């Protein structure tokens, strides 16, 4: 190829190809719009695979410790309120639904619908984080955050603890009670990482709402909304497993 | 290339999304209910089976893998495979060594 300035702009004028032949959003290194969409979709899935392996390590650690220190994990999981966990699961499922509807609105070029769906997704994400804050605050008050101020009171003397007493927990021996700290460490590591993903997602949603109001994504170029949708659904899937594994270990008395 | 393709992908109807939403809600209610039952070793099995069913619904329909290209399907399957390898081989290692003597 020559060093003509046309190369800089990526317009292969030599090939007799004019800008009128494809939509403005098609990059010149792609043959067709479909190829561009497929490549971007593939890249997004590859990113999600790295996320699967990242969370996979945490799930693996959880699995091993849960098998080793099962009584500690049962007692510690009773400190989580299953009602908050269920409410959050519903919030995320509904947000996944509104996100899917947002992608549909973008595909159907419905600007108002897209802005509404993205805003509802944003709102439900905030509800999730709000509930998580209430839960974290409770752990802070009960000294259930791993570290120097960690208290085993609820596990050594369950009668003194409302949540533990409700499930009829037996006092744990000191060495097993110490392992409840591992449960809470994993709880904060896993839900914290998940919450970080939610915060990043909500920030991107905010950006997308502003762009969508200005008319973006409803011109036929839906890739960004679609791939963000994949991310948001992925975060939902992680929560589906976290809810089952952290909250629902054993709820029967 | 004479055919007109506006979209490379299939547009999923909102009806499908509503059905999946309802199925996910039922699954959530079911898994909470099941956790209050005394099923012994089956408690985690039931919880994980329901969670996996829910995750499958999200992947296939909300994430549109059911309607996607073979490349995407292969990518998703390879993701599940590497994840299973991570879990399977790590657990095999732990269980075949000092299990019960930590």
Image: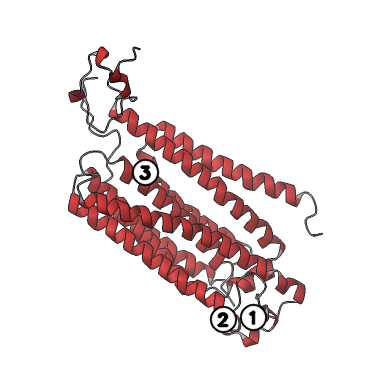
Determine the residue positioned at 28% across, 47% down: A103
The local secondary structure at tag 1 comes to helix
Q: Chain of mark 3?
A: A
Q: Of marks 3 and 2, which one's residue comes earlier in the chain?
A: 2
- The residue labelled by disc 2 is A163
Mark nearer the viewer, 1 or 2: 1
**Distance between the Cα atoms at labels 1 and 2?**
9 Å
Residue drawn where x is 63% and y is 53% of the image: A60
Q: Secondary structure at mark 3?
A: helix
Q: Is residue B54 above or below residue A88?
A: above
Residue drawn at (64%, 80%), measured in percent from left and top?
A: A154
Viewer-nearest of labels 3 and 2?
3
Among numbered discs 1 and 2, the one appearing first in the sequence: 1
Q: Does residue A38 appear in the picture of this structure?
A: yes
Query: Mark 3 highlights which residue?
Result: A227
Tell me whether circle 1 and circle 2 mark residues in contact (CB < 8 Å).
Answer: yes
Quarter of the image for residue A33 reads top left
- Give the left or right position of residue A53, taking residue B69 as reference: right
Q: Which mark is residue A154?
A: 1
């Amino acid at each position: 190829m020559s060093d003509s300035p046309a190369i800089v702009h990526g317009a292969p004028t030599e090939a007799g190809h004019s800008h009128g032949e494809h939509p403005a959003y098609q990059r010149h290194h792609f043959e067709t719009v479909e190829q561009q969409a497929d490549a971007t979709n593939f890249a997004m899935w590859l990113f999600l695979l790295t996320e699967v392996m990242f969370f996979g390590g945490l799930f693996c650690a959880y699995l091993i410790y849960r098998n080793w220190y099962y009584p500690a994990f049962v007692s510690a999981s009773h400190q989580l309120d299953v009602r908050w966990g269920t409410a959050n699961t519903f919030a995320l499922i509904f947000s996944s639904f509104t996100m899917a509807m947002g992608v549909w609105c973008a595909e159907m070029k419905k600007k108002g619908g897209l802005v509404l769906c993205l805003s509802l997704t944003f709102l439900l994400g905030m509800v999730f984080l709000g509930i998580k804050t209430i839960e974290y605050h409770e752990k802070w008050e009960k000294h259930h955050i791993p570290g120097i101020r960690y208290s085993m009171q609820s596990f050594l003397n369950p009668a003194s603890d409302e949540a533990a007493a409700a499930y009829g927990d037996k006092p744990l021996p000191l060495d097993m009670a110490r392992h409840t700290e591992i449960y809470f460490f994993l709880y904060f590591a896993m839900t914290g990482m998940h919450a970080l993903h939610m915060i990043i997602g909500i920030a991107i949603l905010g950006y997308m709402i502003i762009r969508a109001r200005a008319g973006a994504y409803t011109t036929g170029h839906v890739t960004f909304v679609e791939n963000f949708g994949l991310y948001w659904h992925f975060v939902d899937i992680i929560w589906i497993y976290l809810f089952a594994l952290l909250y629902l270990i054993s709820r029967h008395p | 290339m004479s055919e007109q393709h506006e979209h490379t992908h299939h547009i999923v109807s909102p009806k499908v999304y509503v059905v999946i939403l309802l199925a996910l809600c039922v699954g959530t209610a079911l898994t909470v209910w099941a956790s209050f039952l005394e099923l012994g070793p089956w408690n985690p099995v039931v919880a994980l089976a329901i969670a996996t069913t829910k995750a499958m619904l999200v992947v296939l329909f909300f994430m549109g893998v059911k309607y996607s290209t073979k490349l995407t399907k292969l990518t998703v399957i390879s993701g599940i495979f590497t994840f299973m390898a991570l879990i399977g081989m790590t657990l095999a290692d732990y269980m075949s060594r000092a299990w019960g003597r930590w």
